[in-house]
Amino acid sequence: MSTASTNSSLYTLDARTKRRNAAEKRFRLYGMAAVAFGVLALVVLLSSVLGTGLSAFRQTFLTTEITLDEKALDKSGTRDPEVMAKVTTIGYAKVLQNALVDELTAKGLLPEGMKAKDVGGMISKEAPAQLRDRVLANPDLIGQTITMNVLANGRIDGYFKGRVTMESAALDSNVSPEQLQLAEAMRDAGMLDLKFNWGFIFGPDASELRPEAAGLGVAIIGSAYMMLIVLALALPIGVAASIYLEEFAPQNRLTDLIEVNISNLAAVPSIVFGILGLAVFINFAGLPQSSPLVGGLVLSLMTLPTIIIATRAALKAVPPSIKDAALGIGASKMQTVFHHILPLAMPGILTGTIIGLAQALGETAPLLLIGMVAFVRDYPGAPPEGFTDPAAALPVQVYNFTQRADPAFIERASGAIIVLMVFLLAMNILAIILRRRFERRW
Amino acid sequence: MSLGLLILVVIALAGAGFVIGRQRALAQAGGDPRILHSLPGYYGQSVFLFAAVPALLLLLGWLLIQPLAIESRVSAMLTPADIPEGSSSALVMSDVRRIADGFDAMIAQGRMTEDALRAMDANTVDVRAQLAEAGIALGSDVAPNVFETAKSYRNLAHTGRLALTVAVIVTALAGFAFALSRIQPDYRARNVSERFVRTLLIGASMVAILTTVGIILSLVFETVHFFRLYPAKEFFLSLTWNPQFRGGSDLGIWPLLWGTLYVSFIALLVSVPVGIFAAIYLAEYASKKTRAVAKPLLEILAGIPTIVYGLFALITVGPMLRDYFAQPLGLGASSSSVMTAGLVMGIMLIPFVSSLSDDIINAVPQAMRDGSFGLGATHSETVKQVILPAALPGIVGAILLAASRAIGETMIVVLGAGAAAKMSLNPFEAMTTVTVKIVSQLTGDTEFASPETLVAFALGLTLFVFTLGLNVLALYIVRKYREQYE
């Protein structure tokens, strides 16, 4: 080194080496920062969803004693459900409202000058329908006094969850600060409390005005039906296609064409599959819109490449010695595949299938196009007829919730995502267990 | 007979065929399987396949063709007078279908008998009110001719279903009898059923081709249909997007393409550096323990459904960007913006870039690293001057694949980017993308005759061509420039 001066020593670094070492350190830091950014994004994403969504599982319930007045609910006195059905939910809403007012007056909680209508407004609009169903199912309840747990209005619920404040209530036409004060007094008296809300998981969706009653039941069933269809179609077709391509296909144009198609289909945007479903299954074949059948078919086509790729990898991983041994003792090619290779590849195939199913479960865009956005309150029937009934799907339900004006639906959307993620987590854990438990290293 | 029951009957028949075929083979061999050409099970299997497969295929084909055939015969019964102003024959046909379903429902509910329906006359009875009672809502009153059409539609559908049942069962029985009649001790049952299974395997792998064909045909047909109603020149050259459902819309693709490319650009700006640096760190620097923890964590990002990212953009990232960046800087007041969608999409794409790049960096042989270290290069110099150039084609391929993902991504932009079709440079403004418009034009009540709906297919075709092009390019680059070490 010509520039090395008098004090050149291995122990003192010259400027250039220092610069190079600093660059090295910086480079390493960039890498760490990039990994940290990714992990941080994951943490923020999950905590944001969990933070807003966990409260959806708890809901404010109002406990009140209701005297079911014969005069209001069954004028004829026949106790015949068909005659009693003439009283609509409006009649039951009045009964509920009066019951609540009476109880509040008896307990001395009712503030001066508060209108009965405002007291009634604290009860969910879903509650009269629940009461009506209960009475119609059991007409003998009329004349008795029953204790009922009814949903509180979404705004009251929002107050206990911190979404609604006194200030925002003053500006809100749906709730007044007086109602919130009364709600607080009622909580102290034990009439209002937050409880685990099974209705959120098992109940059907509810209209725009009653976020407190919206549930995921129909969406969960719809998603489950679609997963069944995907499993029944994509797994056998995918495995059959992989076996052909991996074990039998000759090297020719057709095989190349199939291979190219599969790798392209894996990269086609999911929304294009939605367009395919709309054009082919709904417009051409005339299958019913928003049915799990069409959703399942579209998702099967989408999942097929994933399953084929996983299955081929699993088939390839079976050592050729097994195949050679089987062929050597006189098995036919088909026997070799079905008796030896396929069983050994099964754990890998199942893992790939579960991961494909998990992908399909979270897919939203194609389902929007085939009409799954429709508002569905009725549970679909039992399969196979139920496959053509209208249904919702979990991820689409999330999208539906986000399109509604009431801010309470944001909490519902995040809650629905938590349910979705629990399913995904369970499927992925199952896949990992299967792999750990059964996968063989050769 | 319901479909489920019919399928069960066919499968039961085939199952019986297996048992009978096996026994017949054994009986012909006098109970000594050594005389048979194949194992007894194969004789059964051949009967099973011949009974079940043709019948089920017939069922599938019939279900696809029957609606078309009935529709064309029935729609001929409708006269132009039956189609109200502003409606189309497709809408009237869907009414016909709904009325026919309504009659089925009414008969199932016991509100009406078949005879009563046959005697019913739309001139004297209010069909709409009767159907409403059964829970079927109709948009308008039922004209007599439409009512008659619905009746014959229903009759044809019922006859078709009956014929289907008979045809399927006859086919199953014929296959059964044919296969059974061929059973003899020297019948090569294994070869026959193996050839049969092999055909089924080939059929399964054709599904991939059929899907592609289906995608291309449905996109191209409807796009041609669209260009008949709307000039192609306008679509490709107009700079405004303003659909009007009363007609006279501007449907230029450029604002949508601009939004798509802008969002994708920001997404790549986030994901490419982060992804590549993360891959370099994990492949070159990280200890085994760090790698074992960090790599799966990053890959979780790829497994999270896009709707979750969409919600994240909507409730967290959007308001945060608006409150801390856009409003203080005076750049806009909208929480949905190109920046929101791009940032969130960038996070989603990190694992796509990082895990592919990671694999490629790991594939660079250790000898090259050792050579570089031996010459006195630091680790980062080795990475920059030896490893990255060697891995470049693969990394470019990974970036192109991520770009194709970004262009086709839907839920994040639906919830994060907004719906206003604009061409602006300000990243804090709401813009829209091709996928958002496909969703908005095709959801809700759609009528497949207006250019406003059909434009979605032209957009879909554009999207398909774009992503396909990127994928092919990515594959080409990887194949062409891949270094072969060995």
Image (spheres, coloured by chain):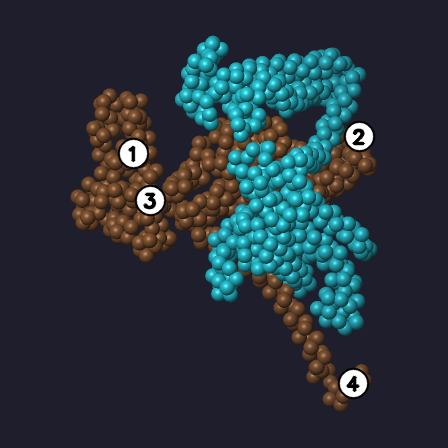
Chain colours: A brown, B cyan
Residue A90 is tagged as: 1
Residue A153 is tagged as: 3
The C terminus of chain B appears in which quarter of the rendering? bottom right
* Residue placed most toward the observer, B408 or B374: B408
Q: Is residue A251 above or below residue A160?
A: above
Q: Amino acid at mark 3?
A: Asn
Determine whether the residue tagged by mark 1 lies in a helix, strand or loop.
helix
Label 4: chain letter: A
Determine whether the residue tagged by mark 2 lies in a helix, strand or loop.
loop
Tell me the residue that label 2 is attached to.
A330
Instruction: Tell me if mark 2 has few (under 14), some (14-19) or many (20+) residues whose alpha carbon lies within 10 angstroms of its own.
Output: few
- Mark found first going from the N terminus, 1 or 3: 1
Label 2: chain letter: A
Instruction: Tell me if mark 3 has few (under 14), some (14-19) or many (20+) residues whose alpha carbon lies within 10 angstroms of its own.
Output: many
Callouts 2 and 1 on one subunit:
yes
**In 3D space, how far apart are the residues under numbered discs 4 and 2 (Cα atoms)?**
77 Å
Q: Amino acid at mark 4?
A: Thr
Determine whether the residue tagged by mark 4 lies in a helix, strand or loop.
loop
- Mark found first going from the N terminus, 2 or 1: 1
- Mark found first going from the N terminus, 3 or 2: 3
The N terminus of chain B appears in which quarter of the rendering? top right
Circle 2 or circle 1, nearest the eye: 1
